[in-house]
Every structure is written in structure tokens, then in C-alpha cells.
Image: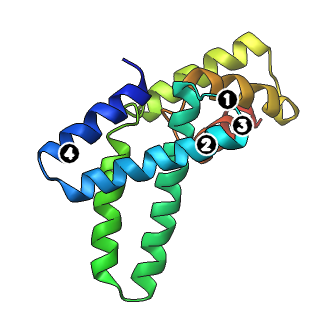
Amino acid sequence: MGLEERLVDEMKEAMKSNDKLRLSTIRMIRTAVKNKEIEQRKKLDDETILRVIQGMVRKGEESIEQFKRGGRSDLVEKETKEIEILKSFLPQPLSQEEIVKIIDQTIEETKASSLKDMGKVMKSVMSKLGGRAEGALINQLVKERLSP
């Protein structure tokens, strides 16, 4: 079952169980996906849908920081619950050791030897990890591995 079908099924389930927060969050995801489809003028594959959801998680985390600064604990709590629901549609993140192992394999495959080769290593690693790790963490680890 693809991610789009899973979203529809989970939305139906949330309707049946009268879970308003889950229902509104899933609708928010589906709207963002539909907007991206309109923007790209094509049906999105699962990988692109995952990137849309990851973007929504990042925006939610930024919102939480702003709500905390503004003293809006009610909104922090709501946003935190929404992020949990969003993350339930993302694949399980890899451990740092697993990420380092993939980075090392990629460095060998691409024969990278210095920070000049970081671009091709990052491109290859990002495609292999498919959203199961944060880009900032991957970037940091690749820099550490390529630095003398």
C-alpha cells in the first residue's frame, strides 16, 4: 500500500473513531500533498510525499520554538501532538552508527578524498537514506569523515 492510500485509510479511521486532531492533521497533510501535485503538475510518488511531511515537521518544530518564546503553552502542546502524528507517517530514523556506515560506504564508492568531494557524497547518501535521517546531521557527519 502506498503512502497516499495509507493517508486515506487513516483519515477514514480517524473519522470513525472521532479523533479530531488526527483527522485535521491528516487532512493538512493531504492538502499539502495536493498543493505540491498542483505545483509540479504530476502525481507525487511516496518519496516526494515523505519530503512534504518532513517539511511540515520542520515547520511545526519552528512554530513550537516561537510559541514557547511567546508563552503559548496551549499552542506548543497542540503543535507537539500534530508533529507526533506527522512523524507516524515517516519511516523510522536510522541510528548514527547506521548513518556513518552508509556514509563510509558511499565515500568508498565515490572515491571521495576531501571536502571538495562533499557534494557528490551528499547527493548519493541522501538518495540512499531516503528521508530516514536529518540533512543537517548527514552534512555534519560527511564533513567529519572527509576532513583530514
Proximity of marks 3 and 4: CB atoms separated by less than 8 Å: no
x, y percent for residue 74:
27, 79
Q: Is residue 140 above or below residue 90?
A: below
- The label nearer to you, 1 versus 2, is 1
Q: Is residue 70 above or below residue 18?
A: below
In this view, the residue in front, 55 or 92, is 55
Label 2 CA crowd tier, 10 Å (few <14, some 14–19, many 20+): some
Proximity of marks 3 and 2: CB atoms separated by less than 8 Å: no
* Type of the residue with mark 4: Ala
* Type of the residue with mark 3: Gln
Q: CA distance from mark 4 to mark 2?
A: 31 Å
Element under label 4? helix
Task: Classify the position of the C terminus by image quarter.
Answer: top right
On residue 42, the disc is: 1
Label 3 CA crowd tier, 10 Å (few <14, some 14–19, many 20+): few
The residue beneath circle 3 is 40
Element under label 3? helix
Proximity of marks 1 and 2: CB atoms separated by less than 8 Å: no
On residue 135, the disc is: 2
Proximity of marks 4 and 2: CB atoms separated by less than 8 Å: no
**Among numbered discs 1 and 2, the one appearing first in the sequence:** 1
Q: Residue at x 33, y 73 (%)?
A: 76
Residue closest to the far right? 116
**Among numbered discs 4 and 2, the one appearing first in the sequence:** 4
